[in-house]
Amino acid sequence: MKALIYITMFLMSGIWFASCRTQYVPVETVRTEYKTRDSIRVDSIYNQDSIYVLVKGDTIYQYRYKYLYKYQYLNRTDTVIKIDSVQVPYPVEKQLSRWQSIKQDIGGIAIGMIVALLFIIVWLLRRKK
């Protein structure tokens, strides 16, 4: 019978400790965004009056340059990098009471006074030597 009571108490304490856990919701705080825009343009200039004739022996070579700078590629790449930090508000579960905030303020002052008193004591002890 005692073993049953101990097992029940153990299981109940496990339920009590597990039920008080806070839930963590992950939130993205920093977001990086890349935007890239490519533009490729094909450009050609027509030049029709450029005909060259070359005679070597009994062979006639005729060169026609119809396109000057044929398919000249103009490539532009614009990249914009944007980094955004998202501020995440954390809700306060329970506000401090007036008495608790006074205790915190007095505690900070008391720690400062103790540190100052220790410095004075050390200074007086070294001065006597």
Image (cartoon, rainbow, N blue to C red):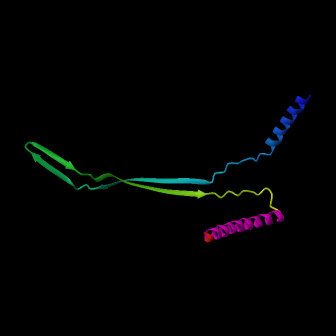
Asked whether, in this view, residue 96 is left or right of residue 119, the answer is: right
Name which residue lies at 55% across and 53% down: 33
* Furthest residue in direction front, as rendered: 129
Q: Position of residue 82 (x, y in %)?
A: 54, 57
Q: Quadrant of the C terminus?
A: bottom right
- Counting labels gives 0
Q: Quadrant of the N terminus?
A: top right
Asked whether, in this view, residue 9 is left or right of residue 47, the answer is: right
Q: Position of residue 112 (x, y in %)?
A: 70, 67
What is the quadrant of residue 128 in the picture? bottom right
* Furthest residue in direction left, as rendered: 57
Q: Is residue 106 magenta?
A: yes
Q: Nearer the viewer, residue 99 or 128?
A: 128
Name which residue lies at 65% across and 58% down: 87
Q: Main secondary structure of the magenta part?
A: helix
Name which residue lies at 81% across and 62% down: 100
Q: Position of residue 30 (x, y in %)?
A: 60, 54
Asked whether, in this view, residue 127 is left or right of residue 71, the answer is: right
Q: Position of residue 53 (x, y in %)?
A: 15, 50
Q: Is residue 117 magenta?
A: yes
For the magenta stretch, what is the residue range? 97-126
